[in-house]
Image: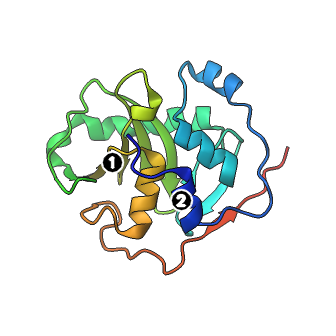
Amino acid sequence: MPKHTIDDLIALIPPPAARPATIDWGPTERRLGFRLPTDYKALADTYGPGVFCDDFLVWTGLPWPDASIEEAGRRAATELEPLLADLSIVTWAHDDGTDTAVDLVGGSFFGWGRSTDGDSGYWHRTGDDPDEWPVLVTDGVMVCDYHSGGLVSYLYDFWTGGFPNRQVFAGREAPERPTFEQVTVGS
């Protein structure tokens, strides 16, 4: 399913020289009650906690900025509920260039990150295989990007123009040189 791999993202945005702390995914996934996508774990293990392009924060298995992935992801899913109440007002964008509405009623969601503007990213948990989960990115009010390729593909396409009809940050240009700023997590 993923269109792009962690290696594609690494070629676009070099990871930090300092290796991030090792994350033991087993206990995290047991506490969550489900497996996390492989591309997400590779991203967290490669980059660690920090911010992409001064804008995107992807929560990791470490407790930064204000909570672990378990706590932050659940809180974000709760924040999505008002949008799900009336999807008729939402403008959609898909990575394949279409803009058809997505039926999210009864769907299961879990947050993976946030932008500095407060836009939120989620996995749409459409089945048992987390590597098949699309991502949903929304301003929480009226616009949603829906990417079938997963988190790493969404980030890659976002910064390379591979998602030209995106609605979230529609007027924002990609930086000339995408960056990642690692944040050191205290124990």
Check residue 53 in the rendering and tell me which mark sits there, or answer none.
Answer: none
Mark 2 closeness class: few <14, some 14–19, many ≥20 residues within 10 Å = some
Q: Under tag 1, what secondary structure?
A: strand
Tell me the residue that label 1 is attached to.
147
Q: Quadrant of the C terminus?
A: top right
For residue 16, above or below residue 74 = below
User: What x and y, as percent, mark residue 113?
Assistant: 52, 48
For residue 32, above or below residue 59 = above
- Look at 20% across and 33% down and name the residue there: 103
Q: Is residue 48 visible?
A: no
Total residue callouts: 2
Q: Is residue 148 left or right of residue 156?
A: left
Depth-wise, is mark 2 or mark 1 nearer the camera?
A: 2
Q: Nearer the viewer, residue 150 or 2?
A: 2
Tell me the residue that label 2 is attached to.
9
Q: Nearer the viewer, residue 86 or 98?
A: 98
Q: Is residue 116 visible?
A: yes
User: What x and y, as percent, mark residue 106?
Assistant: 28, 23
Q: Earlier in the sequence, mark 2 or mark 1?
A: 2
Mark 1 closeness class: few <14, some 14–19, many ≥20 residues within 10 Å = many
Quarter of the figure with residue 27: top right
